[in-house]
Amino acid sequence: KKSYNVVVLPGDGIGPEVVEQAVRVLELVSSKSKDFELNLKSYNFGGVAIDAAGKPLPDDTRNACKAADAILLGAVGGPKWGVGKVRPEQGLLDIRKELDLYANIRPASFPSESLLAYSPLKESIAKGTDIIVVRELVKGLYYGDRKEADLDTPGGDGEATDMMVYNRADVQRITRLAAYLALQQSPPAKLHSVDKANVLATSRLWRRVVTETVQHEFGDKGLELDHSLVDSTAMLMVSNPRKLNGILLTENMFGDILSDESSVIPGSLGLLPSASLSGLPDGKSRCNGLYEPIHGSAPDIAGQGIANPIGTILSAALLLRWSLGQKEAAENIESAVRKVLDTEQMGGLGLRTKDLGGEASTKEVGDKVCAEL
Amino acid sequence: KKSYNVVVLPGDGIGPEVVEQAVRVLELVSSKSKDFELNLKSYNFGGVAIDAAGKPLPDDTRNACKAADAILLGAVGGPKWGVGKVRPEQGLLDIRKELDLYANIRPASFPSESLLAYSPLKESIAKGTDIIVVRELVKGLYYGDRKEADLDTPGGDGEATDMMVYNRADVQRITRLAAYLALQQSPPAKLHSVDKANVLATSRLWRRVVTETVQHEFGDKGLELDHSLVDSTAMLMVSNPRKLNGILLTENMFGDILSDESSVIPGSLGLLPSASLSGLPDGKSRCNGLYEPIHGSAPDIAGQGIANPIGTILSAALLLRWSLGQKEAAENIESAVRKVLDTEQMGGLGLRTKDLGGEASTKEVGDKVCAEL
Ligand SMILES: CC(C)[C@H](C(=O)O)[C@@H](O)C(=O)O
Ligand SMILES: CC(C)[C@H](C(=O)O)[C@@H](O)C(=O)O
């Protein structure tokens, strides 16, 4: 029986509440499995870690993360730490770099067709949207050298700079990971690479290396690739998102913007999972990944027990599939979630939290997912 | 009688067709006015200039633009020049820098409520959207030093870099212009500044200088200012765009993405105008501005006479208002356009081109706008 260490970082705001339900689901899956067991252990991270230890990523948390098979995170941040010099988000930026989590993966699709009414897009436009954003996560503007402006010295030039940096190897590895995910689907998903090659040198590098990597390494696998500009992609995401169905591959800053834009299409942020990976999720390599719902810490509803735990539960499913290679357990969780969300006409329970017009509590949703399992 | 020189750059694709109708409107307005007359003269720019003179911004065009009171542009680019080393878009980037057109202004609102059906957003979400994006246009990633990757020398590091640069004066002047536009509305429009201050040094500079400029120079004018992050703004633009009503002030690259995203809300790209200004549009300073519809050159429908000329006609209205200080003439054009677009129930003509489900030709729309004037 395989044994996996999973580090749990509940974090701030509604983080602990939603993580609690996902942990229940993981423990149930673990106790029922003949193939593997999970050792789950919680650590401080984000705002709570600043309060407890003066920094968002304390050393014991860092070391536990480095040694883990996978990490499950709730959410970090909140107005309490928003203005301080030490901010919770810095913990997130640090851990991405430290674990070399170079690929952020965010699916935007409808877990149940019955949710179309919640999309801000007309149903005819939103219907069938099925985009997986693959965002490069440890290079670009986020980690290049920067110069803060000196605005207080009289006569200072008051100039700030940020540097966007990419090299060939950076683009190759994220392209391989995107191609891997595309080829997991059958027929293979389309690969849409997004850049600003009509302006940026890093984008011209990006376009060329993506093209070469796909041609040389996946040319015989029937992978389709196209390129578009970030501005027209931001338009298309709203006007006709199905045209972007497949894998949307892009660099760090563009990916930050486009993945957030894509995530409102399915109507509830509370439903969507994400993963940040340091290698191909092929079950062969030890893939250290960090999994988290895409919603934030939502301090306004924290402690009320009404937050939607589905995004975190689906993140736990991705963790099983991609970091632990436990595909079946992942699928079981995903179908249990679908059953809970689907309306009664569709044979489901229609059990929903407040963000989806329902009245169920965080715990009730967790209960039902466990019961379905 | 004042006399103004207006340079006309028809450009590529549908550019000449839509510009032709806007020129008719401007000539009519000029011939009817007791206060001013317009001298309109066309020059080569973009792809047609590459074909004629080997470069997208030939010297005579450049000189005419520098000497003009305002510039009206159709569209540039197309597959014909897409791959070449000399690209039409470079002409646009050059002229922005050369004329120091530091403020790009793109309103996203419904010229007529009867167009709500064309929005990709649910009508209840789209209704009442009224955002003016003010984008800094001559700094940031677009004009910082860059290094192209050397991917052909064996053993080269294959690294590319782009530099994002802003200084205090850059942010001050665009803030003043945005504040000026906010105060033109009554009550003053809200100012929403957008950045990525949790990551970028240029964004921290941006946020501080915007705040200081508004406080010191507009503190007594009741101007409301808030700050948000580019990723959550990209979400809000889709999920609840009315929350962004007012002036959305941002830097060059973020503005490129967000202005394109905002422009699909009103449902037809063919309707929306834009302006790029080198000074406050206060009618006092000589404000050299470039005005263009936001749609592209649409090579697929070029030459068929079916393109929507409204975006260009409304750009001509902005030209009259902002560069020439002819507010009344601008308003006359805008109400003529509204009359032509509005449905018959609303007392209008409901005359529309194909992009809006109608059958009118480019010229018919121009005819009717002229008739209404
Ligand atoms: C918190 C912030 C630094 C982070 C980012 O910009 O990467 C967040 O927006 C995200 O997308 O995970
Ligand atoms: C053509 C291109 C260089 C340009 C830009 O990115 O500024 C365009 O997208 C725009 O927004 O006017």
Image: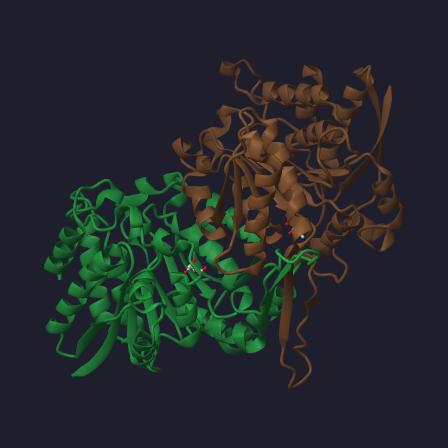
Chain colours: A green, B brown
Query: How far across and how far down the image is residue B52, in percent?
Result: 86, 50
Front residue of this view, candidates A342 and A267: A267
> Where on the image, by quarter, is ligand 1?
bottom left
Residue B271 visible, this orientation: no
Q: How many numbered marks are there?
A: 0
Position of the C terminus of chain B by quadrant: top right
For the residue pair A248 and B188, the one nearer the viewer reads as B188
In the rendered structure, the answer to whether residue B262 lies left or right of residue A152 reads: left
Q: Residue furthest bottom?
A: B155
The answer to whether any part of residue A16 appears in the image is yes
Rendering coords of residue A248 (x, y %): 47, 60
Point out residue A172 in the picture as x, y percentages from the top left corner.
52, 75
Is residue A39 depicted above or below A235 in this figure?
below
Asked if residue B282 is positioned above or below residue A123 in the image, the reply reads above
Outermost front residue = A154
Assign the N terminus of chain B to one quadrant of the image. Answer: top right
Instruction: Name the residue located 39 percent from the left edge and 52 percent from the top edge.
Output: A263
The residue lying at 11 percent from left, 72 percent from top is A32
Please indicate whether residue A176 sits to the left or right of residue B58 in the image. left
A351, A157: nearer the viewer: A157
**Residue B279 shown left or right of residue A232 in the figure:** right
Asked if residue A2 lies left or right of residue B63, the reply is: left
Residue depicted at 65% across the width and 57% down the height: A158
Residue A233 at what x, y percent from top left? 53, 52
